[in-house]
Amino acid sequence: ISVVDVSNPSAPIQIATISVGGSPNSIYVSGHYAYVTNYSLSSISVVDISNPSSPIEIATTSVGTSPTSIYVSGHYAYVTNIGANSISVVDISNPKAPIQIATTSAEAHPNSIYVSGRYAYTANYDSNNISVIDISNPSSPIQIATTSVGTAPISIYVSGRYAYTANYTSNTISVVDISNPLSPVQITTTPVG
């Protein structure tokens, strides 16, 4: 991974690089740590970035096959595993000793994850849908709903009562009303690009 000083947005400067795992695919920064998915090693790395010019990998732990996306919320990291069609929950309360505490099935090729409150939302590339996963008990997550979106959703973002997906193959963005997590509804799709 690279650390880039953006204090001057017109002249960003790379100040450090560190090797992690294999095929790093996604990164999430929380506090003094960066959490990185290692696609080819089916693991995540924890990197201490308290000194940005000298990041240090302090831990790794195994997750499902081919992790592609990570989201940190509180003491947990939530990871999509496209090779296993699953979600991993990793307890990161001790960043030096992260441990996978649960997995749950997801739809085909969960490529992106976003956590909001007691729910995790995944964009499922090969299923052309999103999943809603109840994470109120992190050691026992459960998929509670799905709804169709555009073709090949590759990314998801949640804001308020809506989830937004970027749909790779259909060149669209979908808007999904998630005010009732048990029954999400796509309300519109618009072309982009």
Image (cartoon, rainbow, N blue to C red):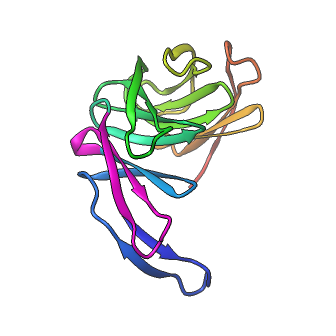
Residue depicted at x 35% and y 32%: 81
125 or 43: which is nearer to us? 43
Q: Confirm whether the magenta stretch covers residue 152.
A: no
Q: Is residue 32 shown above or below 61? A: below
Percent position of residue 3, x then y: 44, 71
Q: Is residue 166 shown above or below 84? A: below
Q: Locate the C terminus by quadrant.
A: bottom right
Q: Confirm whether the magenta stretch covers residue 41.
A: yes
Tell me the quarter of the picture where residue 102 sits: top left
Residue depicted at x 57% and y 77%: 6
Residue depicted at x 43% and y 76%: 53
Percent position of residue 37, x then y: 36, 46
22 or 181: which is nearer to us? 22
Percent position of residue 183, x then y: 68, 14
Residue 178 seen by the camera: yes
Q: How many marks?
A: 0
Percent position of residue 116, x then y: 66, 33
* Left/right of residue 163 with respect to residue 124 in the rendered view: right
Q: Locate the N terminus by quadrant.
A: bottom left
Tell me the quarter of the picture where residue 88 sits: top left
Residue 126 seen by the camera: no
* Left/right of residue 190 with respect to residue 86 in the rendered view: right
Q: Is residue 88 shown above or below 71? A: above
* Left/right of residue 129 with respect to residue 105 in the rendered view: right
Residue depicted at x 47% and y 38%: 92
76 or 40: which is nearer to us? 76
73 or 70: which is nearer to us? 73
Highlighted magenta segment, given as a residue range: 39-62
